[in-house]
Amino acid sequence: MEEACEIARLPEELVSAALAHTSPRDACRAAAVSPAFRAAADSDDVWARFLPPGGLPPLADGEVAVPAPPSSKKELFLRLSAGPALLQDRLVSVWLDRETGAKCYILSARNLFIVWGDTPQYWTWIPLEDSRFSEGAQLMSVCWFEIRGKIHSKMLSQNTTYAAYMVFKTTDNFYGLDFPVQEASISAGATNSTRKVCLQGNDDDGGGEGGVPENYLPMIPFPVRRLRRRNRRVVSHEENATFPQQRTDGWMERELGEFLNEGGGDDGEVSISLVETKGGNWKSGLIVQGIEIRRKKSG
């Protein structure tokens, strides 16, 4: 107890300087130690160190400042880490990782390059009620599946490992998302990575009773097509494909890969893609909100 009292006698400036070299979580914990620590832990000097150097890209009107502008650097950080804030074009949103302050983004479907995305026969745009973005892309029917996104590396936090995720839902009558599996690629600087992913989990029934839906018509000769209708295909472990996970916001996500953003003033781009163009199988029923880029947590 005496040791705690001695620590409480330290000058607030010294405590603030020490806490500024920790993390947002450590600063919040320190605020619970004593009233003296709380004043230092909540100071602007501490929380200014947790905000991104150089600030954020310009935000859309009303973002963060509602119902009133933040009264401190800590309040600003907490608002930015509570959920995505739209940028000025309202096609990209940003938030801060609560543990490290790293900048994270979601690129909306409108911000992505989708092959045939403006052809209603193949893709259509629908309103979204459970997203910060006003609309998403719904896959009607394609046999050439290609979605690409990119972001400037300078928009990301330096020396941070990121992961990219496709954020999506499926309609009740989706089909063709399990085979062939899709190929996800990420290019960042001189580093390129590719992996196999599947937007349909093995537990999904694809809308049928143990068989491929009748409207699942791959572009292959008729005898082989009949065989696949009788035997619904399950992606094998040998293909090493990763599967979707449920999010707390009601959407699904599938990790597309990870990359290290070293920064250092490089004005390069990070390119992300999800493609399946070799099988000729028709696909339908995917609703794309966008691609999320967030700090990769260890473990």
Image (tube, rainbow, N blue to C red):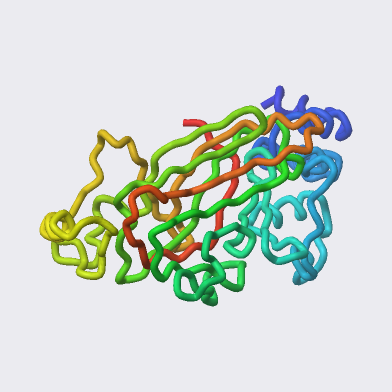
Q: Is residue 86 above or below residue 103?
A: below
Q: Is residue 209 left or right of residue 201?
A: left
The answer to which of 119 and 259 lies nearer the viewer is 119
Residue located 83% across and 53% down the image: 72
Residue 129, can we see it?
no
Quarter of the picture containing the N terminus is top right
Q: Residue at x 60, y 40 (%)?
A: 295
- Whether 67 is drawn above or below 12: the answer is below
Image position of 212 with respect to 31: above or below: below
Residue 227 placed where, x, y %? 12, 55
Q: Is residue 169 left or right of residue 96?
A: left
Q: Is residue 91 left or right of residue 72?
A: left
Residue 154 location in percent, x, y? 76, 41
> Looking at the rendering, which quadrant does residue 102 occupy?
top right
Q: Nearer the viewer, residue 75 or 109?
A: 109
Residue 38 in the image: state x and y as whole percent.
76, 43
